Amino acid sequence: MTRIQIDLLLCAGIAAILAVGCMDAPPQQAAHDNPWDSENPSAPRAPDRLRAYVTTETEVFIRWRDRSGNEDGFNIFESIENEIGMHLINVNQANVDSLIVMGRQVLTDYYYYIESFNRSGASFQTRVSASTKQAPPNAPDSLTIAVISADSIRIDWRDNSFVEDSFELEEAMGIPVNFYQISTAISDCTSVIVNSLAPNTTFWYKVRALNQVGTSTYSEPISVRIE
């Protein structure tokens, strides 16, 4: 074999090594395929168990299960009544699996959708519904008391609800600890007269709204002393 042939064989061998990579180089790392691996280059898995709960007639609590470790965040979408399509209402950070949506319209049907996303894409979860028609009422507030006689008072409050069926008035004597119900009022009523109050006694009052779904929180207690 001539010197030229040997040189040609060596060049061919070097070219082959360069084509396949250095013989001493470590093998290529396999692509990440664990959905919980934060370095997984694939699009994240879709969240599931999406739920929406009406907490008041103007507030909805949304919760879901995070099924990936490589999302950059979550997009939350909403549609209202018969609205065509949906609109983005919030972007949650990664690993944040709930949202409180405030300022909703009363007596309205809402639909919610969610997707997890990263640089590689997004995975979508089907919609769930929530209706502020099926909400406990908002609490009354701004209680005031007017003395109208030696043993009678009128209690007024502000009605903040569109869905209450009634109101409950509760009373405590001396200190605002042991309250008990003394009166009810129909929907949209904003005052009650209380009679036969004992003299030289401090009375405390608070009000809450009710409907078939539940009850509101109580108003702040307010007191009056009959001399």
Image: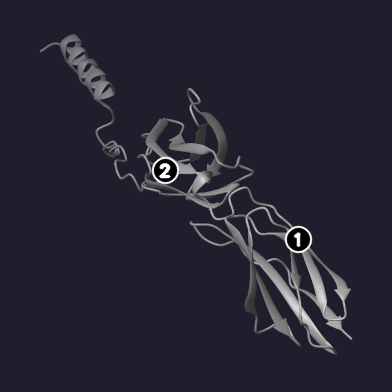
Q: Amino acid at mark 2?
A: Asn
Task: Name the residue beneath numbered marker 1.
Answer: 157
Comes first in the chain, label 1 or label 2: 2
Residue at position x 67%, y 53% in the image: 188
Q: Are circles 1 and 2 on residues that touch, CB within 8 Å?
A: no
Quarter of the picture containing the C terminus is bottom right
Q: Quadrant of residue 185?
A: bottom right
Say above or below: 144 vs 12.
below
Task: Name the residue beneath numbered marker 2.
Answer: 70
| In this picture, residue 178 sits left or right of residue 9 | right
Residue at position x 49%, y 57% in the image: 212
Say above or below: 179 vs 160.
below
Q: What colour scheme does the image use?
A: one colour
Q: Nearer the viewer, residue 93 or 175?
A: 175
Residue at position x 21%, y 16% in the image: 12
Query: In the image, residue 140 lies at what x, y percent?
Result: 69, 59
Residue at position x 48%, y 22% in the image: 84
Q: Quadrant of residue 136?
A: bottom right
Query: In the image, residue 20 lies at what x, y percent?
Result: 24, 25
Disc 2 crowd rating (10 Å Cα; few below 14, some 14-19, many 20+) is many
Q: CA distance from mark 1 to mark 2?
A: 51 Å
Quarter of the picture containing the N terminus is top left
Q: Can you tell which of label 1 and label 2 is closer to the viewer?
A: 1
